[in-house]
Amino acid sequence: MYINENFIKLPQSYLFSTVASKLKEYREAHPDADLIRMDIGDVTLPVASCVIEAMHRAVDDMASSDTFHGYGPEQGYPFLREAIAKGDYQERGIDIKADDIFISDGAKSDLGNLGNIYSRKSVIGVADPGYPVYVDSSVMDGRGGDLLSDGRWSRILYMDCKPENGFKPEVPARGVDVVFLCSPCNPTGTVFTRDELKEWVEYAQRNKTLIVFDSAYEAFVRDPEIPRSIYEIEGAKEVAIEIRSFSKTAGFTGLRCGYTVVPSELKGMDREGNEFPLRQLWNRRQSTKFNGASYIIQRGAEALYTPQGREAIKGNIDIYLSNARYIRKAMEAAGFEVYGGDNSPYVWAKLPGEDDSWKLFERILSEAEVSSTPGIGFGESGAGYIRLTGFNSPKNTRKAMERISRINFKKDDALEDEFKSLNDIKAIKALDDLNVLDDITEALGL
């Protein structure tokens, strides 16, 4: 048999696998190390009790022939699709129906699988830096072209995100067939304004472009002026698919459940220009290649839309956002240029004068025993940056930032006095959010 040669074009290791491998090597070389993980976007707070109770009831359902559930609908059970349509959209004035919603085992799967429904000749647009799955899955499906010397693929349009444009991709001069947008953004923590999303929707309408809108972190948006769904923008249902996840909002990283919205208004074209509803194609794809998420997990997800579930989600996100604000202030105090950490669990940081992300990763690991994610792994525009996450416990977050504060990042001895106080833990304890973190830590026993 012949292999899909697109796989051997890819770098052999996925970013987060490489980080995990380096941390494994560090632990083996330093068995007594007290390593604090601030790199991967995994959560640390437990799943809400109302979810656990709902899943226990669902487990009991499986023990009786009267309530047993075998294969479920590939699109998801109606009880969860209806709860999502009402709780995430209709109550916010957005006309999304249960039939528009497809339950999955997580956003990552859907982001990779959506390529099944658009042409392999499609030109893809991605933000750089951006979530690696957007590029890697496109390359696997044959849409990458050749890997160039600068680490980019010849057939993919990269939209550079830098401080000058607020780390947000700008509408390109040329048209593309599919564009991936993320808000709040992984890895930079930036968010799109309503006017910025309106510009993207208008671009998609002009160019017949499909927007794949990754809003896995929408629950972290606390600013009422910031859109949490692209469907808040008029006309978006005609050009956009939206993908969401319960992983970061409700601690489902190990349970696996998310959903994708494909409105009935959204259409694509064949070679002759005939229009076809994308929902029809996605439904066919899921019916053929997916047997649906677990009944037990879907019952747990349904419980998130109860008053108890919503309160639990809010409480968890309050803690993660407090962690992110704390990280941002601590890294700024240590002399870094810092972005994100507001309406987002991610903090994007650069040490002036340092352009090697892996070198910075290694230094913080060796001198502070704190892990981060090298920004270069998210794209060429991420060179020199690292990503830190607010998903650890408040106690570990504070400890990690205290350790980083002790590193003398300043190369100029003349500036040493200016940053001398950073070697004193009191400088970190003076941060505004510390009292908040202390209260949370004490209340949770963390």
Image (tube, rainbow, N blue to C red):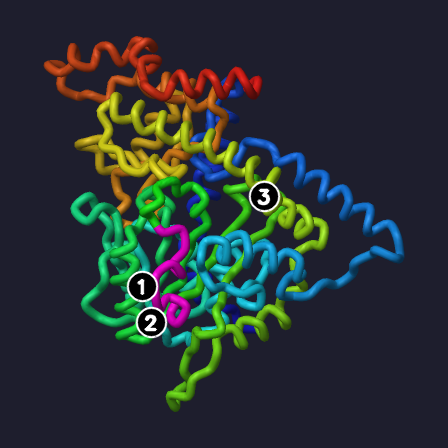
Disc 2: which residue: 209
- Residue 337 vs 209, above or below: the answer is above
Magenta segment boundaries in residue numbering: 227-239
C-beta proximity under 8 Å, tags 2 and 3: no
Q: Dividing the picture into quarters, in which one does residue 370 lie? A: top left
Tag 3: Cα neighbours inside 10 Å, few (<14), some, or many (≥20)?
many
- Mark-to-mark CA distance, 1 and 3: 29 Å
Tell me which amino acid carries mark 3: Phe
**Residue at disc 3, secondary structure:** loop
Q: Which mark is residue 252?
A: 3
Tag 2: Cα neighbours inside 10 Å, few (<14), some, or many (≥20)?
many
The answer to whether residue 329 is visible is yes
Q: Is 332 situated left or right of 300 in this image?
A: left
C-beta proximity under 8 Å, tags 1 and 2: yes
Screen quadrant of the C terminus: top right
The answer to which of marks 2 and 3 sits earlier in the sequence is 2
Disc 1: which residue: 125
Say if the magenta span includes residue 2. no
Q: Position of residue 139 (x, y in %)?
A: 41, 64
- Residue 406 vs 263, above or below: the answer is above
**Of labels 1 and 3, the one closer to you:** 3
Q: Dividing the picture into quarters, in which one does residue 145 lie? A: bottom left
